[in-house]
Image: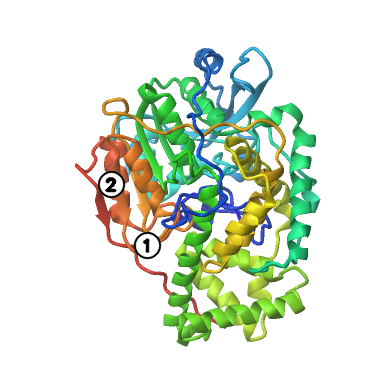
Amino acid sequence: MRAVALSSAVGALLLGALTAAPAGAAAPGLPVLPTAPGLAGLPGLPAAPGLPGLPGAAEVSGTRVAAERARAAGVAFGPCADAQDLPGAMECGTVSVPLDYADPDGTRIELAVSRVAATRTDPGNSKHKVPRQGALVYNPGGPGGSGRYFPLIGMLPEWKRIAAAYDLVGYDPRGVGGSAPLSCQDPARFFKGPSQAPTHPSAAYKKERIAQARSYARGCAERSGSALRHYHSLNNARDLDVIRAALGEEKLTFMGSSYGTYFGAVYATLFPTHVRRMVFDSAVDPDPASVWYRNNLAQSAAFEGRWADFRAWAARHDTVYGLGATADAVQASYEKARAQLAAEPAGGKVGPGQLQGMFLEAGYYDDHWPYRAEALSAYLKGDPQPLIDIAAPVEEAAVEAENASAVYTAVECNDAPWPTDFAVWDRDNTRLARSAPFETWDNVWMNLPCAYWEGPRQSPVDVRTGPGELPPTLIVAAERDAAAPYEGAVELHRRLTGSVLVTERDAGSHGLAGGPNACVNGYVDAYLLEGRLPVRRAACAPHREPTPAKAK
């Protein structure tokens, strides 16, 4: 499952171009997975690293050298290669970074960077010019998410005030899209539909998936060679500092969503004096003991709660969809569809795996709920087309999706220790699947290549800053976010002294900034535009639930 990090407010205009995964994508597991209560004591988890993953002297020096070179070179922004397909005034360029920061004179890679210059126009008064505040750099998460089209978000009403004051800057992180892209297998083999998605897999099925995980890990190593070990969160943070320098910014203004909050927090730990303002949107748990195995367990548990939220909503609208008047009845409708699709895939492309993926995406944003409920309702009434339209793999997107999966796998496998004995995974997830069957095993198969990963692992950075080390930062999070469980935002708030946490109560969307909650947007705008933060934690009422679509 692919992490879609921009707020649902982006809508149809930008979502496909920015970070949305193709419907029915078979891969990436959710990358940003904080710790949920009750999971820390599960047996078989890897021990927390004894030492924080602080860089050595060579990497510190190499980052400084790379940043100085980037400041001197700047970014030669010009027309984008796909400019004819893009609205607005987006420009594109590249920033050169070392593949290995311990060897800044060695192999270098180019990061694709994009920008829309600050409009300087007050959206409330076109005759009034707004002072430019510099560049706002954005990362959408992943790992593996492309941020190159982020600057176009300034066209949306919720972003116009920020777009007036800031150059909106997006980029493809190393390994992604136009930035030395990684690949682990032939994209033509990437989408495997229709597929199964057993919630309690058999021993034979597990054996098959273990073989696939071994093959995938081997493919990553064979296709990238020794370069593969340099794709990790520490280097993502270093790259961010080089981009800051290339843009001519003395201090970084940054917004990270989802996984972007993790390496943004790593950046804040490594470069606190380089920070101007930072927004952590849908924050993940940066505790070294949680990165990344425990975090995936926590995420699987949280998705069960979000799946329950959807079922309760559909039950409240049974007169529209006819899926059942209780959450259990909606579950029964879902299971009926799974059984039918296992026997005869819809359109030859949509099986139980694609159905599960469709509703997994709904766990990110509740504005997806009406269309997915409508598709399930239509299918059970004999019309499979709405389901096929949403859930069938999009073969044209296979290259992008396979690349995103490769980067996700490389970064998470390189970042931290993982259990190398499948018996550990089997024990922990069999236990978890008893109470959280919806997402658990799908998450296992996405991350299992890390059990067989070749090459050295990083020790996760002990993210934390003391009083006065870092300017005040803003964390925004939804209480029922499944992709980044809320406890991760609380942990990040605890570790970044002077940070302020704004909570959307009783809501579960993943990615809040610029979304449907005006209260949350008000806090983000006040911070980015004026540097104002609440004195202490703040809370916003939940945004309105989605309105049902008319079922067929």
Give the x, y percent position of residue 87: 54, 45
Quarter of the image for residue 395 reads bottom right
Residue 401 lies, with reference to residue 95, above or below; the image says below
- Label 2 vs label 1, nearer the camera: 1
Residue depicted at 37% across the width and 35% down the height: 278
Circle 1: residue type: Ala
Res 467 → quadrant: top left
Q: Are marks 2 and 1 in contact (CB under 8 Å)?
A: no
Specify few, some or many for label 2: CA neighbours under 10 Å numbering under 14, 14-19, or 20 or more: many
User: Mark 2 = which residue?
Assistant: 523
Decide: few, some or many residues near mark 1? Use Cα within 10 Å; few <14, some 14-19, many ≥20.
many
Does dot 1 land on a helix, a strand or a loop? Answer: loop
Q: Name above or below for residue 277 compared with residue 205.
A: above
Whether residue 376 is visible, yes or no, is yes
Q: Is residue 72 left or right of residue 103?
A: left
Give the x, y percent position of residue 62.
55, 15
Task: Kindly state the secondary structure of the residue where label 2 is placed.
Answer: helix
**Cα–Cα span, label 2 and label 1:** 17 Å
Q: Position of residue 176 (x, y in %)?
A: 63, 38
Between 544 and 307, the one lying in front of the other is 307
Q: Which mark is residue 225?
A: none
Q: Quadrant of the N terminus?
A: bottom right
Give the image quarter of residue 69: top right
Q: Residue at x 49, y 44 (%)?
A: 290
The residue tagged 1 is 507
Mark sitting earlier along the chain (2/1): 1
Please state which amino acid type lies under the numbered disc 2.
Tyr
